[in-house]
Amino acid sequence: MSPKRNKPTDMRRSDRAVEDEAWIKRFLLEKNVGILATSFGEQPFINSNLYVYDEGSHSIYIHTARTGRTRDNIDANPQACFHVFEMGRLLPAEEALEFSIEYAGVTIFGEIQTLQDATQEEHILQLILDKYAPHLQKGRDYRGITPEELKRTAVYKLAISSWSAKKKQVEADFPGAFALPETSFLG
């Protein structure tokens, strides 16, 4: 039987918990993809997203099409969860069930809302563009967002009410540790 958890951030392996808020913030600032979890009634739904973490508002911002499942779920239930993670090396063992893996991740809980102010939406979309294409400049390498384009996009703010971070990392010379080969389905 699993131990009772009182808060969403309670974790079974507290020895792997990361309490260092500076580490959590740096992780969120540097990672590229997060998974948004929402629900509609009893049906859970996850969606991978590019995102930006804004330290000043203590929020995660994402965007999707103005209509669709993400929007419907958020309108029905603003409680959401967002997860960002990194996978490390596989850690073999003499017993199959003792195999493990290095990892690091942050899970965020909060309430998500659709932004309604066009100026704020454009600002957040520019933050996302700046994060993922810092070498490109608006006005030089691409034109800015038009009002017509903005009407097709929904920008969301996940106000962070709580978060937890977890990390498993072993010594560099762990016997037999190896990185899994990366396979791309994109060409």
Image: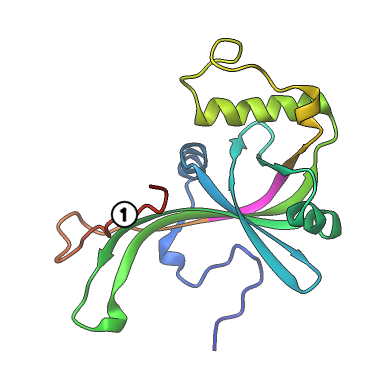
Residue 67 position (above or below residue 29): below
Q: Camera-side residue: 35 or 22? A: 35
Q: For the magenta stretch, what is the residue range?
A: 158-164
Q: Nearer the viewer, residue 72 or 1?
A: 72
Query: Residue at 85% across / 59% down in the picture?
Result: 76
Colouring mode (rainbow / by chain / secondary structure / one colour)? rainbow
Name the outermost residue toward the top.
140
Measuring from the top left, give residue 112's x and y in whole percent: 76, 49
- Kindly identify which residue carries mark 1: 182
Tally of numbered discs:
1
Indicate the position of residue 109 as horizontal and vertical percent values. Answer: 66, 55
168 or 156, which lies in front?
156
How many residues crowd around disc 1 within 10 Å: few (fewer than 14), some, or many (20 or more)?
few
Where's residue 4, x and y in %?
61, 79
Picture coordinates of residue 169 (x, y %)? 31, 57
Q: Residue at x 71, y 46 (%)?
A: 158
Residue 185 lies in quadrant: bottom left
Q: Secondary structure at mark 1?
A: loop
Relative height, residue 52 to residue 143 (above, below) = below
Q: Residue at x 31, y 82 (%)?
A: 97
For the residue marked with disc 1, what is the amino acid? Glu
Residue 164 relative to residue 145: left or right: left
Query: Does residue 178 appear to the left or right of 12 in the view shown?
Result: left
